[in-house]
Image (spheres, rainbow, N blue to C red):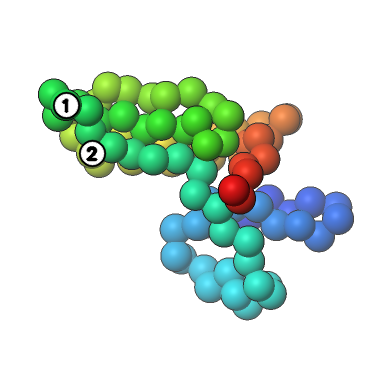
């Protein structure tokens, strides 16, 4: 698990349960996407909740989950970072 610690002390990461985030204080956890099948059984990673693209189609859910993880990991550590996700 990789953590992005900003100068203001905020920590961002993709939670994979490898680390107890409560050790750092109360975390703010947001769902950033949805991985769901369409009517034909093709899987998509819909990143719309984080103002990002829809990835897919994939023939297996595990492939959609992996693409989702890779996309967010790249964005988290890129220059601009992952867009803020609304809690509403």
Name the residue beneath numbered marker 1: 39
Residue drawn at the location 55% of the way across and 53% of the way down: 30
Q: Look at 81% across and 60% down and name the residue there.
A: 9
Above or below — where is 4 with respect to 39? below
**Residue 67 makes an appearance in the image:** no
Rendered position, 15 above or below 73: below
Is the residue marked by circle 1 packed among few (<14), some (14-19), or many (20+) residues within 10 Å? few
Q: In the image, which disc is placed on residue 61?
A: 2
Residue in the foreground of this view, choosing between 22 and 41:
41
15 sits left or right of 13 in the view? left
Horizontal side of 77 relative to 67 (left or right) equals: right
Alpha-carbon span between mark 1 and mark 2: 14 Å
Residue 56: quadrant of the picture: top left
From the viewer's perspective, is 30 left or right of 79?
left
Q: Which residue ends up furthest to the right in the rendered image?
A: 8
Residue 36, x across and y down, in percent: 28, 37
| Residue 25 visible, this orientation | yes
| Disc nearer the start of the sequence (1/2) | 1
Q: Position of residue 8 (x, y in %)?
A: 86, 55
């Amino acid at each position: 698990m990789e953590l992005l610690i900003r100068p203001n002390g905020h920590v961002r990461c993709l939670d994979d349960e490898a680390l107890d985030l409560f050790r750092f204080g109360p975390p703010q956890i947001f769902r950033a996407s949805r991985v769901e099948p369409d009517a034909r059984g093709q899987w998509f990673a819909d990143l719309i909740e984080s103002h990002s693209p829809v990835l897919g189609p994939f023939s297996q859910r595990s492939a959609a989950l992996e693409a989702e993880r890779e996309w967010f990991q790249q964005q988290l550590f890129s220059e601009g970072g992952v867009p803020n996700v609304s809690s509403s």
